[in-house]
Amino acid sequence: MTGSRPERGLRVRRRQDHVLAEFAAMGCPCEILVDTDDESAARELANVVAREAWRVEDKFSRYLPNSVVARINGSRGLPVLVDDETAGLLDFAACLYELSERRFDISCGALRRAWVFDGASRVPDQSLIDAILQTVGWQRLEWRRPSITLRPGMEIDLGGIGKEYAVDRAVALLAAQSSIACLVNFGGDLAVVGARRDTAGWQVGIEAPGSDGRRAHRLVHLGAGAMATSGDSRRYVEVDGRRLGHILDALTGWPVDSAPRSVTVAADTCTQAGSLATLAMLHGPNAENFLLDAGVKFWVVR
Amino acid sequence: MHKYMSRIGLLVVIAFTAGCSSLGVEPWERDVLAKEEMQLVTDPVEAGIDDHIYFSKEASSGGRGFGGGGCGCN
Amino acid sequence: MPRQDKTAIAASLASATCSLLGTPAATPVQAQEEPGWDLNTALLYYGENDDRVQDVSLNLQAIRNFVDDRLLTLGLAVDTLTGATPSGAIPFDGPQTFTRPSARSTYTTPPNTIPLDDSFLDTRVAVNASWQQPLGRLYSIGAGLSASNEYDYMHMGANLKLSRDFNKRNTTVSAGLAIAMDDLSPVGGAPIPLSQMLGEDDRSNKTGDQSKDVFDVVVGLTQVINRNLLVQANYSYSNSSGYLNDPYKILSVVDGTSGDPVPAAPVPGEDFPSHLYLYENRPDERTKHSAYGQAKYYLSGKVLDVSYRYMTDDWEIDSHTIDARLRWPMGDRSYLEPHLRYYTQTAADFYRISLVDGEPLPSYASADYRLGEFDAVTVGMKYGWKLASGHEMSVRLEYYMQDGDAPPGQVIGNQALQELYPDLDAIIAQFSYRFGW
């Protein structure tokens, strides 16, 4: 994500058996596939989704100066009152904090100052990490609905749950608006709604990095529900020949050791799928066991 | 002469392999390479049929991999 | 992380999500990884000019994808071959009579045409199975078995392959080896090399079954050059030993001045060949070296596939093959793929169009046109399309033309008036259907 705003346009075109609408939001390419031949009906639904995506982005992006998150991060130790929607996300973040035994922590934002995930070998000084860890920690902030108080220097970042949440919100709006089947995909986090006219579901391709000759794609038939992927394909650091992903363990301040390269999960909602994928990554070498116990369909690439 | 040739050949292969470390793409740039039509053998059945036809009608065989099963024709 | 009650995690997550989103999910997730089996079937027609070989074959390949890039491949091919093939006898200005391999009857060929042996009728069944899987993070290993059977030939083979990735999987080095053990039971028995073709029911110069072994080694390097370009280079070594002759191929013995076949002295009471023909003989060993390079280049939706192969062996045969294909997508769901192949080979050092009566017999001699000197061109077009169900179909039509010349130094007398090399024209037509299951 950069500071500059990409253009907020919507591109709609017809495909063989559906209409495809594309736009950019939350720093990734977004698309809606609408199971209809009616281009104007599809455009209407796509507009609903795009507007919701931009609304969530404007409200919760830490990079936009007027967002709720920016306001919280700039509060300098003073309590901030938040609305129901923000409160819901903070409650969810608290839940993930507990479920991950404190390894998933939205107040990790400050660690971004230490880590740059561009594929180079820049590893920050342990002293820097230690210093930042002094300011990081959900236990150090006070969240008592509807008021949140950060210590000076602390920052929160909803990037780990915002996209999946936006997908689920968009899908709920679509379901309320029409019965046309749609697939909403925000940069790889996706969900489907409705029943398609002619086929039973949607085909989703998962890319599993492989060298030539090996099938690089798996095809998943998604009839209902959602899929989300947590992975390091774009952002990582290479240290001593080992690849360290961008998912930081909030307890150590370092990327998770022996984490899979990517985890894709299928679940009822995109929020659940994304959370399970992230939690699995935090389990490092035990990602598969964790997901097996969780009883969900998953694909892990190591 | 033959010995020099094979040593030079080995050096070329090693140099090429070492030089290869500067070529290539990042894992997230493999979108095109992952396409079905960019695989080295896009249709193994057709490749097998062609290999068999040319093996039966010409004196050369294989190249990609193995002869892959003989027949009473050459 | 210490083991918690993980299903409790999933349950807690579900209820937390419910609180966040305000409603429970409308329908539970339905996600199914697409077909375990990838099935590829092809129906082929191959037909040569002038009543020569025709082949109709059915090919099946089933690939089963397991988790973690493990692959099981099963293949089946059934060919029915009919038609005639040049026997190696030289054409001349008169009819010729030959004994069939079975020695049960004879056949006569018209003057001024390359003699074809039409006893060539066979059904071939070939099967293969292979397994491939990753070994650790960077290695991949594969092993396979193959077998084929036809009336007079049986093949069994095994192969092994190991690959390793380097440089973020941009470079792959692989090595493989294969062995094959083939058994031949020629119709009527394998003839004693360079012995004379005898008459009906005379099998006195025929022996029994024969065998041959083949050993292949391949080493290869695959390299990603950039986002749109992939190249591969291979070196292979192949060694065949055992019975390498074609038991049905003969050479005409000709007069040293006229170049016409020498009439045979008939044996009373036997239907006998009209002229003197000797069965061929090839060395009992052959070593081949091949170098192969291939590049695949993606240019705005089109894919260019170019490859080159050089082969040289200890029979003095050198060959060059250039193959180019261009996949041209047409819309979202179909493509056109023109194909061009050029092949050229030099003759084996024991290739003879005929043997001269009275001269000492060479140790090895063969008139098999496939060991001669020729150029071949294939031009073809393939059209493929994808159905709404995701199944793929394609049709291709190719034209294969082989054009050779007898080595000028070998042409004697009247032979110059004849077409000595059996130029080949063949049509290749294939329909293929690929689907998951």
Image: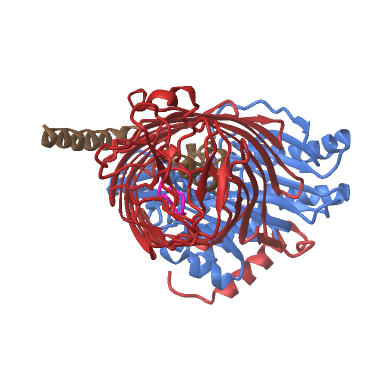
Q: At 67% from the left edge and 53% from the top edge, which residue is drawn?
A: C435
In the image, is C81 to the left or to the right of C319?
A: right
| Residue situated in front as seen by the camera: A86 or C411 | C411
Provide the residue span drawn in magenta.
Answer: B64-74
Does the magenta-highlighted stretch encompass residue A205? no
Q: Quadrant of residue C261?
A: top left
Q: Is A179 located above or below residue A117 in the figure?
A: below
Q: Is C178 located above or below residue A246 in the figure?
A: below
In the image, is C116 to the left or to the right of A129?
A: right
Q: Which chain is brown?
A: B
Q: Is A213 located above or below residue A138 in the figure?
A: above
| Residue situated in front as seen by the camera: A177 or C133 | C133
For this orientation, the residue located farthest to the front is: C268
Q: Position of residue C60 (x, y in %)?
A: 61, 56
Residue A75 in sight from this viewpoint: yes
Residue C155 in sight from this viewpoint: no
| Residue situated in front as seen by the camera: A91 or A1 | A1
Dominant secondary structure (helix, strand or loop) of the stretch shown in magenta: loop
Does the magenta-highlighted stretch encompass residue B71? yes
Q: At 38% from the left edge and 59% from the top edge, which residue is drawn?
A: C159
How many numbered circles does the render carry? 0
| Residue situated in front as seen by the camera: C213 or C95 | C95
Q: Position of residue C259 (x, y in %)?
A: 39, 29
In the image, is C400 to the left or to the right of C21?
A: left
Name the tint of chain C in the rendering: red
In the image, is C354 to the left or to the right of C35?
A: left
Q: Position of residue C251 (x, y in %)?
A: 40, 42
The way the protein has been coloured in the rendering is by chain
Name the tint of chain A in the rendering: blue
